[in-house]
Image: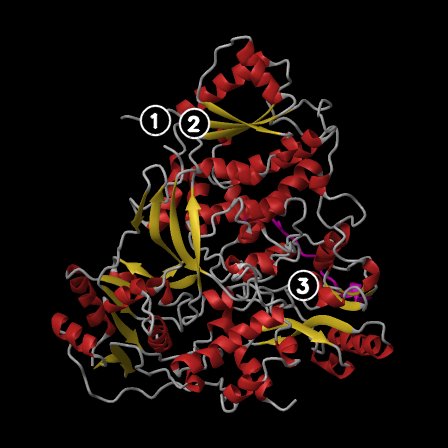
C-alpha cells in the first residue's frame, strides 16, 4: 500500500525547545524527518485548540515542548502549561485517543541530543501505531463516504 | 406531608422583598415538566415559589446573564441555592464575575435531588458534603432531618474509564454524532459566561462551525478544557441537552482527575486562585519526557 | 383496515424500488427520525420524535460547493438526494413541511430544498396519543390533520386506515399497491393545551416596543434548542471549512437567539436577549403571516417540551395579548 509517511506536529517554545531543535540541526544530528515544528512564544501559549486542529489537518501525533521548570523566559508559563497539559493528556485518553499521540517534553536550548532522541522515539512509536485513521474518518462519517471535508494538505 | 421548608422559604422571601433587602429574587417555580426558574419581584408572588426534591436546576448561571447581569451593579439580587449550586456562585466570585455583596444567598438544606426519570437520587448528589450550605446569608431547613447520601458520584465517569481505548472512542464518536450544536450545554452552564465564545470566532476559526463529527468533537473537547478546574458538576449541561449527550461526564472526568491529582475541588475556595491560573513547584510531571 | 405489521412488511419492497426510508427508531433513550435499512426497527410507540423532517429536507449540514485554490477550481457539492419515503412522522411535522414549502419554494426557490421535496413522499401516521405540550389544534391543525401529508394512516380499532391525500400520494400508492380505506377512524385524542391567536397578529403589528417583551423572555438563556428542534424554523448560516488551499462551503442551521446571529452582515442588530426572543415570536406569528398568510407554528410543542428552563410559547402568546 502506498501509505504516506506519518506526520507529527511539534509546538515548541521559542526560548528553549525550539532552540534545542535548532541546535540538533546546527550540530548535524540525524533524526527522522517526519516532524514539522511550529514555534510559539511559550509553552503557556499552547491551547487545546492547537492540538485538535493539528489532528484535524492530518497530524498523526502532536508534541508540545517547553523550558524545564525554573527556566521559563516568562518565569512560570511552562508551570501553568504543565497543569493544562496533564488535563489535556488525560482527557484525550478518556475520549479514546492513544496517549502516544500527545507527548509533552521539557527540552532546553542545550539539549539538541535530547530533542533528536525524542523525535526518533515518537516517530518510532507512531510508525508502529500507524496513521491516525480514526480521527481522519470523523468528517467522512457525517457527510457520507467520499464526501469528507478534506482541508488538510495531502 | 406538609412541606415546612417551602413554607418557610416563601415567608422569608416575602419578608426580604418587603424590607427591600433584595429587589428581585430568583428561585424555583412550577413548569410543565416540573420545575423552572421563577423571578420574584412582588412579595405577593413569593407564594409561587416551590421547593422539593425535584429542584435540580442550578440557578447561578442567571447571575451572569440577562436580565440579572444588568441589574447586578445597583440592586441586591436574591438567589436560592443548594450547597452544590453555591459552588458555582463561588467560582463566579473567584473569577470576579459576581460581587458577593451584590447577592443575597438563601441556602436550602437538601436531602438530595430525585431524577425526573424515577431512577432515584441523582448521581451528582452521592457523597454530598454540602447538604447544609455554609457561607450563604441564611439557611432554610432543618439539618436534623438530613439523611446521608451514599455512593460514588463518579460512577458514570468510571464506567467509561473502564472501557478500552477503542470502546471509548466509539462511545464518544457515536454519542457526539447526535450533537446538533444548539449550544444548550454552553448556555445552561453557569460558568460558560464568555461574551464571545471560541465557537463564534472565525478569524481564525478554531472549531468547525458545522455539526460535523470533527466539529462536534472539537467543540466538546475544548469546552471541557475551558471548564477544567471550574466545573462544579451541577449537570446543567446534560440536563439541557435535547439529544441526551452526557456532556457532564466529560467535565466531571476532568474534575475527578484534578481532585485526585491536585486535591483541588472547584468552588470550595472563592478566595483562592483559579486552578489553571496557578501552579505549584511540585505539580505532577510524571507524564513529561 | 390494515394492521401495522402488514404495512411494515411492505416497506422492504419500497426500499427495493429504490426509495430510502426515513422512520422513527430508538437510539439509546431517544426516538429519532433516521434513515432505516431494517423496517423491523421502526418504533411508532412515541408521541413525537426529537428531530423533525427539517433534518432531511433542510439538513443541518450540507455541502454547497468545494474549492481548490491551487487548481483554481470551484465545483458544486454532490447532489445526493434520493427518492425518499418519510414513514411514521406525525401530522404536525407534515404540516410544517407545507409551511416550509410556501417559504422556500415561493418567489425565490431554494433549489436544494425543492429537489428533495419533489422526491419525497410523506406517509404520516396520525396520533393516537398526545401529551401536555401538544397544541396543534390551536394552530389550526390536529392529531389527524392531513395538511402536508401525501398519505395519512389514521388509527382505527388497533389498526390503520389508509387515506390518500395528494396526487403524489395516489401515485405512490398505486405504484406499491397500497389500497385506501374509507371506514371511519377512531376519534382524535383530546388536547389539554389550548391557546387562542385571536388578536395576536394585531397586537404584534403595533407593539414592537413593549415592556412585556422583557418579562416574557426572562427565563430564556439564548440557546438554540427551540430553534433546532422546531419543524418550521429555517434560518441558516454559510460556513467555509478550509485548509490552506482547499475547502468546502457548507450550509448549516443558525438561530436568531444566538448573540452571534447575522454577524456575517457586520453585526447582530438585536441587542439584548428580549429583542432576540421577540424576533422569534415576530417571525413566527407576524412576519410569516405577512409574507405567506400562515403562522409559522404547527403546535408540535417541542420548544415547550425541550426548553431547559421552561419557556412556554403558549403561555407567552397569552401574556402578550392579555390586558395586563
Residue underneath mark 2: A7
Real-space Cα separation, disc 1 to disc 3, in angstroms:
50 Å
Judged left or right of residue C151, residue B20 is right
Of all chains, the one bearing label 2 is A
- The reply to whether callout 2 and callout 1 are in contact (CB within 8 Å) is yes
- The reply to whether callout 1 and callout 3 are in contact (CB within 8 Å) is no
Q: Quadrant of residue C33?
A: bottom left
Q: Residues within 10 Å of mark 1 (few under 14, many from 20)?
A: few
- What number of labels is visible? 3
Depth check, front residue: B206 or A131: B206
Depth check, front residue: B140 or C150: C150
* Magenta segment main secondary structure: loop
Which label is found at residue B65? Answer: 3
The stretch of residues the image draws in magenta is B139-156
Quarter of the image where the C terminus of chain A is located:
top left
Q: Are marks 3 and 2 on the same chain?
A: no
Q: Residues within 10 Å of mark 3 (few under 14, many from 20)?
A: some
Quarter of the image where the N terminus of chain A is located:
top left
Q: Residue B249: x percent and y percent?
A: 56, 49
Of all chains, the one bearing label 3 is B
- The reply to whether callout 3 and callout 2 are in contact (CB within 8 Å) is no
Amino acid at each position: 500500500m502506498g501509505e504516506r509517511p506519518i506526520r507529527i506536529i511539534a509546538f515548541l517554545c521559542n526560548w528553549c525547545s525550539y532552540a534545542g531543535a535548532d541546535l540538533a540541526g546546527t550540530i548535524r544530528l540525524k533524526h527522522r524527518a517526519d516532524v514539522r515544528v511550529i514555534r510559539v512564544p511559550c509553552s503557556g501559549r499552547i491551547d487545546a485548540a492547537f492540538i485538535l486542529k493539528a489532528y484535524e489537518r492530518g497530524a498523526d501525533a502532536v508534541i508540545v515542548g517547553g523550558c524545564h521548570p525554573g527556566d521559563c523566559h516568562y518565569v512560570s508559563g511552562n508551570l501553568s502549561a504543565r497543569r493544562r497539559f496533564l488535563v489535556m493528556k488525560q482527557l484525550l485518553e478518556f475520549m479514546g485517543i492513544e496517549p502516544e499521540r500527545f507527548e509533552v517534553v521539557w527540552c532546553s536550548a542545550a539539549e539538541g541530543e535530547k530533542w533528536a532522541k525524542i523525535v526518533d522515539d515518537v516517530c518510532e512509536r507512531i510508525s508502529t501505531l500507524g496513521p491516525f485513521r480514526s480521527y481522519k474518518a470523523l468528517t467522512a462519517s457525517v457527510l457520507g463516504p467520499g464526501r469528507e471535508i478534506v482541508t488538510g494538505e495531502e | 406531608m406538609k412541606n415546612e421548608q417551602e413554607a418557610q422559604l416563601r415567608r422569608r422571601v416575602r419578608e426580604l422583598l418587603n424590607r427591600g433587602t433584595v429587589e428581585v429574587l430568583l428561585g424555583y417555580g412550577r413548569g410543565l415538566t416540573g420545575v423552572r426558574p421563577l423571578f420574584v419581584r412582588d412579595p405577593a408572588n413569593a407564594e409561587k415559589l416551590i421547593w422539593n426534591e425535584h429542584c435540580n436546576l442550578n440557578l447561578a448561571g442567571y447571575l451572569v446573564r440577562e436580565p440579572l447581569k444588568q441589574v447586578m451593579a445597583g440592586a441586591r439580587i436574591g438567589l436560592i441555592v443548594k450547597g452544590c449550586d453555591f459552588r458555582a456562585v463561588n467560582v463566579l466570585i473567584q473569577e470576579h464575575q459576581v460581587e458577593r455583596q451584590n447577592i443575597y444567598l438563601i441556602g436550602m438544606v437538601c436531602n438530595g435531588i430525585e431524577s425526573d426519570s424515577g431512577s432515584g437520587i441523582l448521581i451528582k448528589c452521592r457523597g454530598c458534603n454540602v447538604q447544609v450550605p455554609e457561607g450563604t446569608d441564611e439557611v432554610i431547613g432543618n439539618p436534623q432531618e438530613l439523611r446521608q447520601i451514599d455512593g460514588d458520584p463518579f460512577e458514570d465517569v468510571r464506567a467509561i474509564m473502564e472501557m478500552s481505548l477503542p470502546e471509548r472512542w466509539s462511545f464518544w464518536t457515536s454519542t457526539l454524532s447526535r450533537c446538533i450544536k444548539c449550544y444548550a450545554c454552553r448556555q445552561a452552564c453557569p460558568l460558560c459566561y464568555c461574551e464571545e465564545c471560541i465557537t463564534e470566532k472565525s478569524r481564525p476559526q478554531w472549531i468547525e462551525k458545522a455539526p460535523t463529527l470533527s466539529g462536534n468533537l472539537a467543540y466538546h473537547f475544548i469546552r471541557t478544557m475551558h471548564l477544567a478546574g471550574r466545573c462544579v458538576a451541577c449537570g446543567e449541561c446534560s440536563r439541557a441537552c435535547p439529544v441526551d449527550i452526557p456532556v457532564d461526564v466529560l467535565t466531571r472526568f476532568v474534575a475527578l482527575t484534578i481532585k485526585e491529582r491536585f486535591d483541588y475541588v472547584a468552588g470550595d475556595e472563592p478566595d483562592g486562585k483559579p486552578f489553571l491560573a496557578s501552579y505549584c513547584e511540585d505539580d505532577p510531571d510524571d507524564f513529561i519526557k | 383496515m390494515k394492521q401495522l405489521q402488514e404495512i411494515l412488511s411492505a416497506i422492504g419492497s419500497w426500499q427495493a424500488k429504490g426509495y430510502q426510508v426515513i422512520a422513527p427508531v430508538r437510539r439509546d433513550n431517544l426516538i429519532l427520525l433516521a434513515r432505516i435499512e431494517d423496517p423491523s426497527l421502526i418504533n411508532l410507540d412515541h408521541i413525537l420524535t426529537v428531530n423533525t423532517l427539517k433534518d432531511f429536507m433542510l439538513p443541518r449540514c450540507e455541502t454547497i460547493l468545494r474549492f481548490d485554490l491551487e487548481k483554481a477550481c470551484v465545483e458544486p457539492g454532490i447532489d445526493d438526494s434520493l427518492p425518499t419515503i418519510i414513514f411514521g412522522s406525525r401530522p404536525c411535522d407534515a404540516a410544517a413541511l407545507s409551511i416550509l414549502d410556501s417559504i422556500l419554494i415561493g418567489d425565490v426557490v431554494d433549489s436544494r430544498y425543492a429537489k428533495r421535496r419533489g422526491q419525497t413522499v410523506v406517509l404520516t401516521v396520525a396520533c393516537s396519543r398526545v401529551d401536555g405540550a401538544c397544541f396543534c389544534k390551536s394552530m389550526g391543525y390536529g392529531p389527524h390533520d392531513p395538511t402536508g401529508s401525501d398519505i395519512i394512516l389514521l388509527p382505527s380499532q388497533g389498526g390503520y386506515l389508509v387515506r390518500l391525500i395528494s396526487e403524489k400520494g395516489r401515485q405512490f400508492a398505486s405504484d406499491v399497491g397500497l389500497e385506501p380505506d374509507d371506514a371511519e377512524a377512531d376519534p382524535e385524542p383530546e388536547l389539554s393545551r389550548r391557546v387562542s391567536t385571536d388578536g395576536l397578529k394585531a397586537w404584534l403589528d403595533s407593539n414592537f416596543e413593549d415592556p412585556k417583551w422583557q418579562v416574557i423572555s426572562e427565563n430564556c438563556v439564548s440557546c438554540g434548542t427551540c430553534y433546532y428542534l422546531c419543524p418550521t424554523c429555517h434560518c441558516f448560516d454559510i460556513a467555509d471549512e478550509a485548509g490552506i488551499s482547499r475547502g468546502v462551503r457548507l450550509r448549516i442551521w443558525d438561530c436568531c437567539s444566538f448573540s452571534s446571529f447575522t454577524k456575517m452582515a457586520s453585526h447582530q442588530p438585536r441587542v439584548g436577549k428580549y429583542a432576540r426572543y421577540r424576533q422569534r415570536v415576530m417571525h413566527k406569528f407576524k412576519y410569516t403571516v405577512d409574507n405567506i398568510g400562515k403562522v409559522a407554528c404547527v403546535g408540535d410543542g417541542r420548544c415547550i417540551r425541550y426548553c431547559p428552563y421552561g419557556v412556554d410559547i403558549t403561555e407567552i402568546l397569552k401574556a402578550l395579548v392579555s390586558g395586563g
